[in-house]
Image (tube, helix red, strand yellow):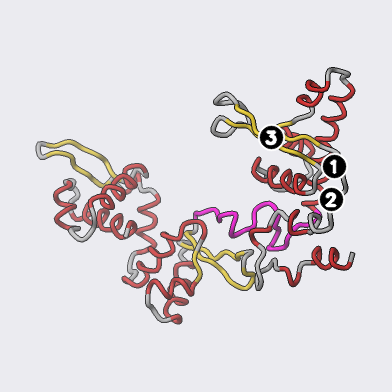
Amino acid sequence: MRFLATLRIIELCHQFPHGITDQVIQNEMPHIEAQQRAVAINRLLSMGQLDLLRSNTGLLYRIKDSQNAGPVSFFLSKMKGSDNQEKLVYQIIEDAGNKGIWSRDIRYKSNLPLTEINKILKNLESKKLIKAVKSVAASKKKVYMLYNLQPDRSVTGGAWYSDQDFESEFVEVLNQQCFKFLQSKAETARESKQNPMIQRNSSFASSHEVWKYICELGISKVELSMEDIETILNTLIYDGKVEMTIIAAKEGTVGSVDGHMKLYRAVNPIIPPTGLVRAPCGLCPVFDDCHEGGEISPSNCIYMTEWLEF
């Protein structure tokens, strides 16, 4: 609906080149709610497609000349001649955002035959209005999203995947290096010969410090976020090698979120962890993506097989 409202406003502006008022928009689009009309207008203004003018009758919205054409003008040229079915499919894909949508779900929402949907998808792809992205959740299925969107991590798998393959060796290297950094921090604190409380506090490092250390090592070909490093640190916590504490932090402090900061330090386990605690599921950074029938599943997990054999 948001896409249709934007398209209709552009058409009205071309129909009335001297400008249109809110009343004209309301009269021509009675079936669209006021909030949706406002969102469409604000979107066009922010993208530089409309000029906002004042007149005796109130505010006027006027389309900018072709020399200043932007993304919407480009989009309209691509959609020229498209029928309502193609516009409907585009709208459904747009609403799906950067998580994309399967052709099966497009069929369900549009109530169009699968053969017609496939034809429309190919046409939209050829115009570079949409793109197909393989999802790590199901290797044989593709999701569709707008061409200019960056796929969500749930689709690509984030830093832990390369061409839909889980980079287990890369994760292990990160695991080792993060732990090595925290061990070094703890060793430096012990060598300081200060009182135990100061030593303990000095052995902590923020996730930002660990992230900076990993970035400076240059061992990753992809850009890692602090969230990625915290995922690795969590696996070390589950393995009993690291503990975490959360402290209050001043607003704007590097590494803090909502006035809080996560601190980590290496620890020596008092007793060896039990076999169940050491199960690969408790250490797996892609645990949430693991399900039967998916690219990652208990039935084809080599780590689970090795653990059971051990």
Q: Is residue 188 above or below residue 211?
A: above
Which callout, 2 or 3, points at the residue further toward the start of the chain?
3
The location of residue 201, given as percent across then percent down, is 76, 25
User: Residue 245 — which label?
Assistant: 3
Amino acid type of the residue tagged 2 in the rendering: Pro
Circle 2 packing at 10 Å, graded few (<14), some (14-19), many (20+), is few
Near-viewer residue (76 or 301) = 301
Numbered marks: total = 3
Q: Which quadrant would residue 188 be assigned to in this image? A: top right
Q: Is residue 210 above or below residue 101?
A: above
Spatial CA distance of label 1 from label 2 is 8 Å
The location of residue 192, given as percent across then percent down, is 87, 19
Q: Is residue 181 above or below residue 129?
A: above
Secondary structure type for disc 3: strand
Report the residue marked by disc 1: 269
Amino acid type of the residue tagged 1 in the rendering: Pro
